[in-house]
Amino acid sequence: GNVGQLKSNVQLVCAHGFLNNLDKDEVVELTVRDLPDEIKQDWMSSSKNIERSKMISEYVNITTIISPIVEDDTTKIDDSFNLYHVIEEKAKILNKEGLTKKQINQYILTDIHLHVRSFFNQKMLQNHSLLKFVEDDVMQMTKELKEVAEHELDCKFDRKFIYFLSMHIAAFLKRGKQIDVLNPQETDEIRETHVKEYEVALIFKDKIQAYFKVTVPEIEVIYLTMLIQSIKSWKENKRTGIVVAAHGNSTASSMVEVATELLGSTPIAAVDMPLTVSPAEIVSSLAEKVKQVDEGEGVLMLVDMGSLAMLETRLEQQTGVKIKTISNVTTSMVLDAVRKVNYLNLNLHAIYDSVTKDFIDLWADKPRVSGKKKAIVSICTTGGGTAKKLEEILTAIVSRTSDEQISILTVSSIKLASRMKEIEKAYEILATVGTKNPKIDAPHVPLEVLIEGEGEKVIQQVIGNGNVPASGGLSGKNVVVKELCEDSLKKYLVFLNPYHMIDMLLEWLQTVQDELRITFSNAVLIKVIMHTAFAFERVIKQNPIAFPEEEEMNDQLQNVLHITEKTLKPYEEKLGLAISEDEKIFIATIFSEEL
């Protein structure tokens, strides 16, 4: 009756047959014993099926050989449970390609991780039929190994750990001769990189040897190490939960249904709110759904009305879960959030900012409130130095982005609630920036997001009705970096012009980014500008700093140093100042850490 279930059963029967025939090259032989128990029982117990069997045998032989017609890639068996196949095939190909041992190791680990991930995502694991393909003794041993891993690694694994590991051990026991595809250096590297997991794999080895009376070679311990590491990192990869809440009998459910249908399962829940439901019931329902989807990374609430956003703090207190809320939810916003949770592995903060940024035009396109002046509100703990600096940064961003008259209003977070009410009456607030989110219906840019760089784009989009002004590379745009560097450089540079240095170094950093094919965060840009400006100043003072002799130069650092030297040369000539080799190694080290 259920085609999906039939497909799962066929796949499981083939997987079971494949495990039983690992020693055979040409044929995977499937017999009645490969059927799941319930099908086997059902088949044997029904006289109708025996009649059907006779009828079918008139048309097909007792043994039917199914062969691919054309030998091409599409006919290969999808060896979805066999880790050895994954490792050996990948290692053979990469060795032929002449890759280094480190690259091969990295590729294989990535493959195993993806292999584990796709296995853990399979819906058929929701039922227990997979366990019917593993002998009881393997299952018992795997349960014991799960307890060992949990104790040693101080974390919890679910039943999928048993599924995956038991399939792997079953494959190992049936496999016979080992093919050692990793060379000694690669295995050494795995031991050194994943010390704790390797120790757990050694315990696994002793237990498997004692229980099954087999020899477990060192290469199998390495495979187990990589496997434990992959499952562990999959466990650690917690996703942000999503709750969609909207008024109407099925508005939220419909949006969630579309998103999961198109983009697959994710920790998401819908809260439909018929107009008859009381506020207390809404809060209770939201709290329940927030707890349901929380995996430890917090929950993004997408709501249809700004009034629901006001519940954020109350729900955080009630559930103990970190929550961020975005109003004016649409189906495309839900799709965007699900895509980011499923495929980008962003944390709650990053997803909130990313979705907000992508849908900023919703705010930008809102009809302007007539007769009100426009403002950006800067929020700080006190009205002191940080507030002043933040106001300067925002003023610079506004003046670069628009000719409109936009006020920058500074508010202390202590008086936030009362001051915001006054400001909302007199101004149309385009965005708020700073240490505390006032939870109004306008985008909020946290201080750290502004400093990191993304916030500047959000503010530019709000002011420019969804458009970010085109700029000539780093030197043309980065207001935050310029503003934050200027203060310090004005204070400490004695011989060099701070304004000229910042523009010049931003231009240089654009070249470095192009060469390294990377985009640095504002924090890195600030660090490099400060360090390099002072390095030039130290040339004049004849007081260079020395790079520690005990620090080793690896290939990557050597390559980055070469790029640093090459790109800095025109600027050294322009200033008539040559930075020392040691200073350049320091600068290259900062770049190298970001690769």
Image (cartoon, rainbow, N blue to C red):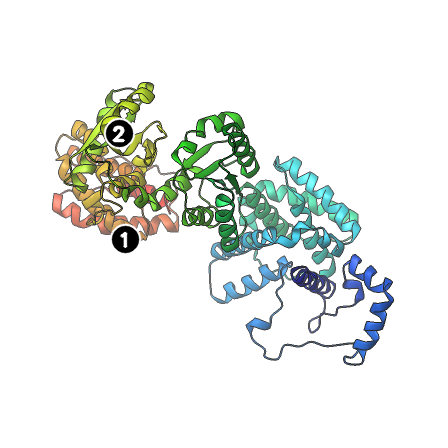
Seen from the viewer's position, the closer of residues 388 and 427 is 427
Q: Considering the image in quadrants, where does the N terminus appear?
A: bottom right
- Number of other residues with Cα within 10 Å of mark 2, as a class: few under 14, some 14 to 19, many 20 or more: many
> Which image quarter: residue 539?
top left
Earlier-in-chain disc, 1 versus 2:
2
Q: Amino acid at mark 2?
A: Val
At which x and y percent is residue 399?
16, 38
Seen from the viewer's position, the closer of residues 49 and 536 is 49
Q: Which mark is residue 377?
A: 2
Is residue 543 visible in the rendered image? The answer is no
Q: Amino acid at mark 1?
A: Asp
> Which image quarter: residue 489?
top left
Residue lying at the far front of the rendered structure: 276
At which x and y percent is residue 415?
31, 18
At which x and y percent is residue 138?
76, 50
Is residue 209 visible in the rendered image? The answer is yes
At which x and y percent is residue 57?
80, 78
Residue at the spot x=43%, y=49% of the render? 331
Left or right of residue 179, residue 438 in this image:
left
Residue at the spot x=37%, y=43% of the render? 354
Left or right of residue 337, residue 590 in this image:
left
Left or right of residue 366, residue 238 in this image:
right
Per the model, the C-alpha gap separating discs 1 and 2 is 35 Å
Numbered disc 2: secondary structure: strand
Q: Which residue is mark 1?
A: 514
Seen from the viewer's position, the closer of residues 550 and 539 is 539
